[in-house]
Amino acid sequence: MADSDLSWERLEAETVYTCPGFDVINETVRLPDGAETDFDYVAEGESVVVLPFTTDGEVVVIEEWREPVQRVNYGLPAGGIEPDDDEPAAAVERELAEETGYEAGRVEHLTTVEPANGFADTVFHYFLAEECAPTAQRDLDHDETIDVTTTAFGDLLAAVREGELRDGRAALGILYYHAFERDGSTTSQ
């Protein structure tokens, strides 16, 4: 699928802005035609997004304030992969417990996407967490304000359809599960 004739060559790169959560990188690149130009992108790295089902078949969902859009966001637990996470599944367990107080009996990878690879290096690893029970202690970050509840998967799907759930990370996970996993028609990853 990759065509080396389309590849850019990175000549230089520097971090021009940094803050908790992301950096802005400025690169000097050589294009396939030999021209040199600058390119800027957001460096955020890898995160996990969790679709957690309780032992009763409900989905654990969160409501969280999102400053850029100035409203409470309805969605799924998610968070960055940290350097001491051996693999993305470790981040799933940590983020699920920290944000919701739930722990999963079983965790399975669903898919991995690059949601905005034209201007960010963001990678989302989607996971299904099953047999979740409220057995952990929540440990929110200093800037997180999160309420936790459960809902039926059908109601969550309707919230995406009706525009009530507008978080793109969560919507993709819910729709992916609905389209490819729920009826067992997916091929192994």
Image (tube, rainbow, N blue to C red):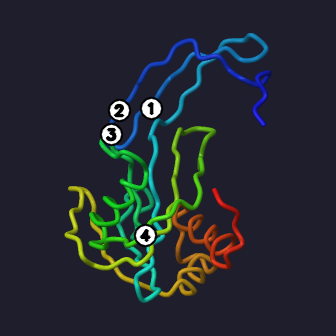
The amino acid on which the numbered mark 1 sits, given as a three-letter code, is Val
- Residue occupied by mark 3: 83
Q: Residue at x 52, y 52 (%)?
A: 124
Q: How crowded is mark 1: few (under 14 residues within 10 Å), some or many (20 or more)?
A: some
The first of marks 3 and 1 along the sequence is 1
| Residue visible at 32% across and 37% down in the picture | 19
Q: Give the crowd class for mark 4: few <14, some 14-19, many >=20 residues within 10 Å.
A: few
Q: How far apart are marks 4 and 2 (CA)?
A: 36 Å
Does 22 sit left or right of 11 as displayed? left
| Residue topped by disc 4 | 106
- Helix, strand or loop at label 4? It is strand
Which residue is label 2 attached to?
A: 18
Quadrant containing the C terminus is: bottom right
Which marked residue is nearer to the observer: mark 4 or mark 2?
4
Occupied quadrant, residue 134? bottom left
Residue with the mark numbered 1 = 24
* Direction from residue 98 to residue 35 in the image, left or right: right
Q: Nearer the viewer, mark 3 or mark 4?
A: 4
Q: Does residue 72 appear to the left or right of 162 in the view shown? A: left
Mark-to-mark CA distance, 1 and 2: 6 Å
Tell me which label, 4 or 2, sits earlier in the chain: 2
Count the labels in the image.
Answer: 4
First along the sequence among labels 4 and 1: 1
In the image, residue 146 sits, relative to residue 117, either above or below, namely below
Q: Which of marks 4 and 1 is in front?
A: 4
Q: What residue type is labelled 3?
A: Pro
